[in-house]
Image (tube, helix red, strand yellow):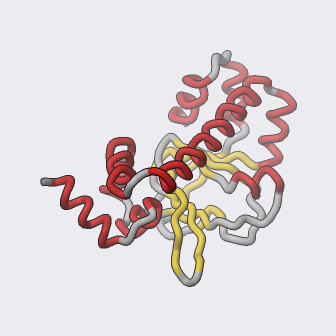
Amino acid sequence: MELLKDCISKQVSIDTASLEKILSMFESEELKKGDYFLQSGAVCRKMAFIETGYLRMYDIADGKEITLWIGSSRKFITSISSYVFQTGSIWNIQALTDCKLHVITKEKHLLLGEQEPKWLEFDNLLLARSFALLEQGAFAHLHTTAQQRFDALMKNEPDLFLNVPQQHIASMLGIAPESLSRLRKKSIK
């Protein structure tokens, strides 16, 4: 849990006892490639910190898989609306590779919120970053070209291109796989 410990302590000033209490509420879980962390329609009752591996958040529309986001090491993943409001998820979250996760249940999350002020501080930052990421993604799809989105992803998440099937990356970028191939060839030149 060293990566989770590092993630929390780098974002909030926290004493050892509080950090240990927070970490004690997480349980380690492993997913094999293809396993689901969450399936569409189910109520999301947990949130995961990804230690290793890649998970994708996607839906199926008109028989076509649409990838919203791909989570990687040092990131949290959940269906926010389902987790917070305990409603059926509109998203599937599936392991693209074998994954090692640190998972907190909704019940333990709420308990920490009552008992540990530093958790609330960290949780607020996490939620704010999630909204910022969503906002940036919406802006990018509305106001940038496929080339610009590709370049930004290549700069910020280069390992995705080595570990994630290209059709999922293309879907996340809002382009056809063939367009992604052209962009990749163009960037190599």
Could one spot residue 151 in this view of the protein? Answer: yes
Vertical relation: 164 (above or below) 159: below
Q: Is residue 63 placed above or below 138 in the rendered structure?
A: below
Residue 128 appears at what percent x and percent y?
Answer: 66, 36
Viewer-closest of 30 and 34: 34
Front-lying residue, 123 or 136: 136
- Residue sitting at x 24%, y 59%: 184
In this view, which residue lies farthest toward the right? 114
Asked if one can make out residue 158 in the rendered structure from this viewpoint, the answer is no
Question: Which quarter shows the C terminus?
Answer: bottom left
Q: Quadrant of the N terminus?
A: top right
Query: Is 97 rendered above or below residue 152?
Result: below
Whether residue 113 sits left or right of residue 89 in the image: it is: right
Q: Residue at x 59, y 23 (%)?
A: 9
Q: Is residue 85 left or right of residue 30?
A: right
81 horizontally vs 147: left or right: right
Residue 37 at x, y percent in the picture: 62, 62
Quadrant for residue 97, please give it.
bottom left
Query: Residue at image x 73%, y 39%?
Result: 25
Query: Which residue: 45% across, 64% down?
Result: 174
Q: Nearer the viewer, residue 162 or 125?
A: 125
Given the current orientation, which residue lies at the most extreme left position?
A: 189
Determine which quarter of the picture holds residue 173.
bottom left
Residue 169 lies left or right of residue 133; in this view the side is left
Residue 143 position, x and y percent, is 47, 51
Q: Residue furthest front?
A: 143
Image position, residue 74 (x, y; %): 50, 40
Q: Tell me which corner region of the image, top left, top right, bottom left or bottom right, holds residue 26.
A: top right
